[in-house]
Image: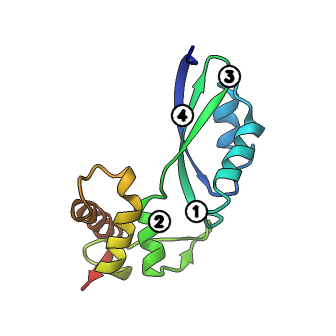
Amino acid sequence: MAKKIIGSLKLQVKAGQANPSPPVGPALGQRGLNIMAFVKEFNAKTADLEPGTPTPVIITYYQDKSFSLELKTPPASFLLKKAAGLAPVGKRNRPKGSAKPGREVAGTVAVAQIRKIAEAKMKDLNANDVEAAMQIILGSAKSCGIEVKG
């Protein structure tokens, strides 16, 4: 007999750096899930990713307090900022896009890089082919203030 699903939870955690502190601990704890089991499983599954990459994860939890993880690809904005080579700024030390997208350019990427990002994110995007996925990524680039050359 299949396990009965109680619910699901979406979190964005840095790859290989999950720990029981907020936001992970409280989100899992209030649902009665084993926090350390999640931390160990998530860190093991994201060991092959670059440490610190924000990784969306969907946690489906069951009546017997067990859970399953579904990892998604990193956000398009993160991949675009990385491809554009934007330097980390601010107190959180993260790359930022343009403060005025459309007027100021934060960085530039090539069409080949857009295609590479679209192919990587294809399974998570609502697109039928790579060309449609590229259009979605181009929209994200525009909203980040990243110019596309080529």
Residue position for label 3:
65
Tag count in the figure? 4
In the rendered image, the residue lying farthest to the top is 1
Residue 45 vertical placement versus 10 (above, below) = below
Q: Which residue is mark 4?
A: 9
For marks 3 and 4, the one nearer the N-term is 4
The residue located at (64%, 56%) in the rendering is 46
- Dots 2, 1 in contact, CB < 8 A: yes
Question: Going by the picture, which residue comes out furthest to the front?
Answer: 1
Q: Can you tell which mark lies on residue 84?
A: none
**Label 4 – label 2 distance at C-alpha:** 22 Å
Q: Which residue is mark 1?
A: 53
Element on which disc 2 rests: helix
Which element type, helix, strand or loop, lies under badge 4?
Answer: strand
In depth, the one of 147 and 66 nearer the eye is 66
Callout 4: few (<14), some (14-19), or many (20+) C-alpha neighbours within 10 Å?
Answer: few
- Label 2 sits on residue: 78
Report the front residue among 22 and 5.
5
Q: Residues within 10 Å of mark 2 (few under 14, many from 20)?
A: some
Are discs 3 and 2 less than 8 Å apart at CB?
A: no
Asked if one can make out residue 21 in the rendered structure from this viewpoint, the answer is no
